[in-house]
Amino acid sequence: MKGAPEADVRTALGGGFPKHPLHKIACIGALAAERQAEGWPGRGGRAAPATMEDHETRRRIIRQWMALPKDKRQTAEQAAAFAERAVQQNELQRSRLDPHQRVMGWLLPRVGRE
């Protein structure tokens, strides 16, 4: 509508305030979210690392896993053995999850990846 008279543009847009295309999704998300004691939930229901130290430990373990040759990180059994060693070698922050389960949660999405 480049070069059209202002009246034509306003007629085409309508009288109401235009809503963002994701407005409805954002409103539903705000209604569904529940504030928890530690803050708003995020990351698709996964808990955020408790501390920066825990985040760095997670990154270090994932880097070690991805540095292995591809044939050494193809199965869940290989990930479980690696996770057991990683738990013994690293000090993880206390969590409601077993340390082995936490490390497996970090590794399983990366099993077989390049």
Image (cartoon, grey):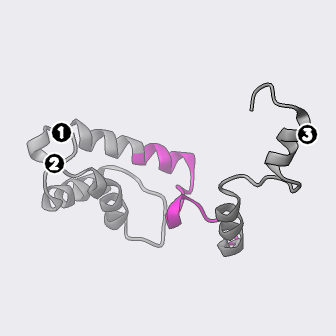
Percent of width and height locating residue 53: 52, 46
Q: Secondary structure at mark 2?
A: loop
Q: Residue furthest top?
A: 3
Is 35 in front, or is 83? Answer: 35
The residue tagged 3 is: 7
Q: Residues within 10 Å of mark 3 (few under 14, many from 20)?
A: few
Question: Which of pointers 1 and 3 lies earlier in the amino acid sequence?
Answer: 3
Percent of width and height locating residue 74: 13, 51
Name the mark nearer the viewer: 3 or 2: 3
Q: Type of residue at label 1?
A: Leu
Q: Residues within 10 Å of mark 2 (few under 14, many from 20)?
A: many
User: Which image quadrant for residue 65?
Assistant: top left
Q: Type of residue at label 3?
A: Ala
Q: Residues within 10 Å of mark 1 (few under 14, many from 20)?
A: few
The residue tagged 2 is: 73
Numbered mark located on residue 68 in the image: 1
Q: Type of residue at label 2?
A: Arg
CA–CA distance in space, label 1 to label 3: 66 Å
Residue extent of the magenta highlight:
36-58
Q: Secondary structure at mark 3?
A: helix
Task: Please give left or right for residue 97 compared with residue 112 in the image.
Answer: right
Question: Which of pointers 2 and 1 lies earlier in the amino acid sequence?
Answer: 1
Pointer 2 and pointer 1: residues touching (CB < 8 Å)? yes
